[in-house]
Amino acid sequence: MDRLTELEVLVHTAELGTLSKAAELLDISTASATRHLAALEKRLSVRLIERNTRRLSLTPAGHEFYSHCKSLLGQLRDAEASLTTSLVEPMGTLTITSSISFAMLHISPLLVEFKRAYPKINVKILGENHYCDIIDSGIDLAIRIREFEIDSNITIRRLAHTRRILAASPDYLRSRGAPTDVEDLYNHDMLLYNHAYQPRILNFSKEGVSKSIKIDPTLETNDGQIVRSAAIFGAGILVQPKYIVHDDLIAGRLVPVLDDWSLPTLTINIAFQERRYMPAKTRLFIEFLANRFQKERYERYWMR
């Protein structure tokens, strides 16, 4: 019996719940998959799979052995991918997740150039304004605005820092007047992105002085582009990272509000699974994006 196939049968049976589905995935017969599993249990002298229900399940010993097998097979795939991609043109589908705003502003505009350099790499973008599980969702890399990752298997690479600012349209400020102190915000229409950290609490600082206010938004939404659009059309004062509204500030569509006060700085990171052998498609895009940020020096504008 092929020992590698035995391990693959165990892993896929544990994940799919039936031997028939595992056999189909491995392109072998169910009878063959049954023999492989039986041979593995006989060689180890331990039962790995419980067979007393319609859906097979792992025994306690099976759970422990499964985790080792899963890791071993993953390392083998990574090693094969590393060798293959060093010998042939990089290819495959690269799955990226980020906020919709970041995808629109800083991923989509790069795809033509990236595709020209690596024509056999296709890109799948998942625009999500919440953080997906990278490993379980089959994501190659994610753009995240937070300082660290809870999962030790996730590695981060910093792209840039950005200020979080308040801004409104010229029409709104002519109509309502510009606030001169943070307490004035209580008398204004506030536009809120509710996936920010503690979105209703604004912690301001200036020259050693700190002020904290709680806002009651006129509009709250889970998408930064909705907040941006509402502000441009005069709906109120937004609170957003500067990377989202920088072009609007330059064009005069939005005007900074209380710009002498600072909100906590945000960190934009690339997050990806820690692997000894990273697939070429992932490594190439990480370097491509990091080099673009270094070349354009975005942080120089976003931290002003």
Image (tube, rainbow, N blue to C red):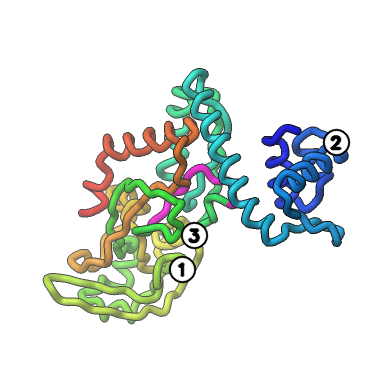
Measured as percent of width and height from the top left, residue 206 is found at 16, 71
How far apart in space, not on screen, are marks 3 and 1 (Cα)?
8 Å
Residue with the mark numbered 1? 194
Q: 10 Å neighbourhood of mark 2: few (<14), some, or many (≥20)?
A: some
Report how far apart the C-alphas of labels 3 and 2 lie in the structure: 48 Å
Q: Are marks 1 and 2 in contact (CB under 8 Å)?
A: no
Amino acid type of disc 3? Answer: Asp
Asked which secondary structure carries label 2, the reply is: loop
Q: Residue at x 39, y 74 (%)?
A: 189
Q: Judge by depth and name the residue closer to the eye, 104 or 61.
A: 61
Residue range of the region highlighted in magenta in the rendering: 136-145
Q: Main secondary structure of the magenta part?
A: loop
Element assignment for label 1 = loop
Return the x and y of residue 13 as percentages of the image width and height: 75, 48
Q: Amino acid at mark 1?
A: Asn
Q: Which residue is mark 2?
A: 29
Tell me which amino acid carries mark 2. Ser
Please give the name of the residue rendered at 43% of the width and 75% of the height, measured from the top-left corner. Answer: 217
